[in-house]
Each structure stands twice: as C-alpha cells, then as structure tokens.
Image (spheres, rainbow, N blue to C red):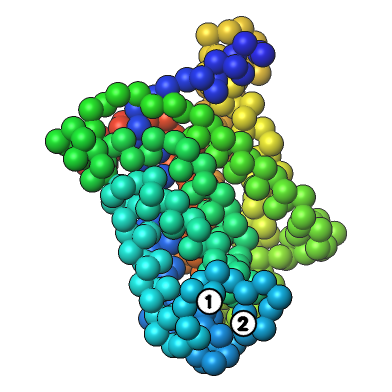
Amino acid sequence: MIRWWIDLWDREEPATALAALRVSISAALLLDLLTVGRLGLVQLLWSPKEGGGLLNPLARDAVPLLYQWLPPEPWAATAIHVAFCVLALAFGAGLFTRLSGLLLVLLYAQVAALFPFGDRGIDLLLRNALVILLFSRCGAAWSLDALRRTGSLRGDGAPVPAWPRHLLILQLSVVYFMAGVQKIAPSWWPMGGFEALYLVYQNPAVSRWPFEWVASWAPVTRLATAATLLFEWSAWILPLLYWFRATRERPGRLRAWANRLKLRSAWVFVGVLLHLGIALTMQLGLFPYGMLALYPAFFHPDELAALSRRLFG
C-alpha cells in the first residue's frame, strides 16, 4: 500500500478535471459577487465607515492593505468589487491563469480582512482550493492560455500532475467528516427524533419558502436528517473506496463488494442531491454552489469525458 500511495501522488492525467474545477469555482465566486452587487451590499460590506460601511477597518492596528492604498471613498469599494469580478472571470477563462489566480486569492483574502464577519466557512474552503489550483496546471486545457499556446481551447492533450485533484478529495473527505462530528445537537440524533431539518425549515431566516406543510411529512424530513448525518460520518471511507477502485484487480471480498455496488459513485451522487436540495430549499448563500463547484475533483478526466458524451452525445 505504501508503494501505491507514492505512485498515487506521482500520477498524471489529462487536464480536463482540473480545468473543470477552475471553471466551476470561478463561476460560483462570480455568481456570489454578482449577488452582492445586485443586493447593493458592496459599500456596506467593503467600505470603511467614512464610505458608508458597517465596520471601520481604518481604526484597526493593522489596516488592510487595500485601504492603505485606496482612499476611504465609496468608489473604492466599487473598484474592489469590479476587480474581484474581473479576476474571477479571467481565472475561469484561463487568461494568464496563474497570475490571475494568484491575484484572485490575494484579493479574496483582503476582502475577508475588510469584513471578517462575512468570511464564511465556504470562503475559507474555496480560497484553499484556489491555492492548490495555483500549483496545478489547471490552465492547460479549456482556457485562453491553451488557445494562445497550442491554437486550441482544448490544449495539446498532454498529461498533467494529478496530485492537486487527489489532495482536494482528501480535503473534502475531512471537511464532510468534521461537519458530521460537529453535529452534536440532539435534533440530529435519534434521541431528538431526527428533527434537525424540520426545525431548519421552520426558520424563516434560512428557509427559502414557507414550509408549514412539512409537519405532515415528518418521516421524510427525519429520513433526510439521518441520511445527511450518515453521509457526513461516512466521508472518512471515501479515500478507501478510491483505493479499492484503483486496485480492483487485487483479491478481497470487501474490495470486490465495494466496487460491484459502486459505493464511491453512490456517495458522490448523494452529495450532489444534498447540495441541490439545500440550494432549492434554503437560503445559505454561496455554500451549496461553492461545494458543488468542488465536485469535479471526485471524477477522473475519463469519467468526465464519458459523462459529457452521455449528456451531449
């Protein structure tokens, strides 16, 4: 297994999965940024008090770099927002991928410093994913960089290191498992009747629609609560399922059983349903879209190609 582990981090694969991650993360960020603009929150969140903001970063001992360079005027927050959108778009399009990605990460971190209360867990996760992609060759396919270099948006098809995708799989396994471990409220467990989701749907600050009728569907919400907890607690098994899949020629009943039932695909499918359900029924901002933006990491480029053929012919 040690030999396999070393080989895992040394593998190469087509760049399409990393390109899909680049595009999906950028699209999720751009969607969130456009929502901030549509709701008129730019000055409120990113301006100092002099510019109409909620907080006063100028009064801190360590003033964020952005306001060491920019005046405390409303137009400065607008300029930050526009630059953020342009960098997200440039990185997604693969235009000077590493430079635009580096500037995007730095600006993302500075925006978090301007309004720390708005720096969500999904923001931390996406920034970390962007840093990993900076050290990858995610711009080698489906990018303007590939078009400049090879004359084709698809690139030249040369394999790239696969370790960034593998690292993201490990990170997502940890994130999901720790999310399950931290669900300690009784409503998530049998002693609380698995009522967590029912209670969420009765909270108008979170629920997207009025869900008074959910009370008559109690068995469904209880089942969904238990399934969510099981999904997150089982995330530690995911790397093992990938190992079983990569070593399917080896003997072992557990390995054969896991591969025959396609447990890895089933786990990922449940995750997609979970986040789609959150997006449709709850108001949690970037969270469901940001998590789904990381899901291309779960698929080998050959699987993405097969899925594309099924969907689009």
Q: Tell me the distance, in whole angstroms, between the alpha carbons under discs 1 and 2.
A: 7 Å
The reply, left or right, for residue 297 in relation to residue 115 is left
Percent x, y of residue 21: 41, 45
User: Residue 58 has which mark?
Assistant: 2
Observer-nearest residue: 100 or 6?
Answer: 100
- Pointer 1 local density, CA inside 10 Å: few below 14, some 14–19, many at least 20: some
Which comes before the other along the chain, label 1 or label 2?
Answer: 2
The reply, left or right, for residue 214 in relation to residue 265 is right
The reply, left or right, for residue 304 in relation to residue 175 is left
Q: Is residue 273 above or below residue 302?
A: below
Amino acid type, residue under disc 2 in the picture: Leu
Q: Is residue 237 above or below residue 294?
A: above
Amino acid type, residue under disc 1 in the picture: Tyr
- Pointer 2 local density, CA inside 10 Å: few below 14, some 14–19, many at least 20: some
Percent x, y of residue 177: 70, 45
Is any atom of residue 139 visible in this view?
A: yes
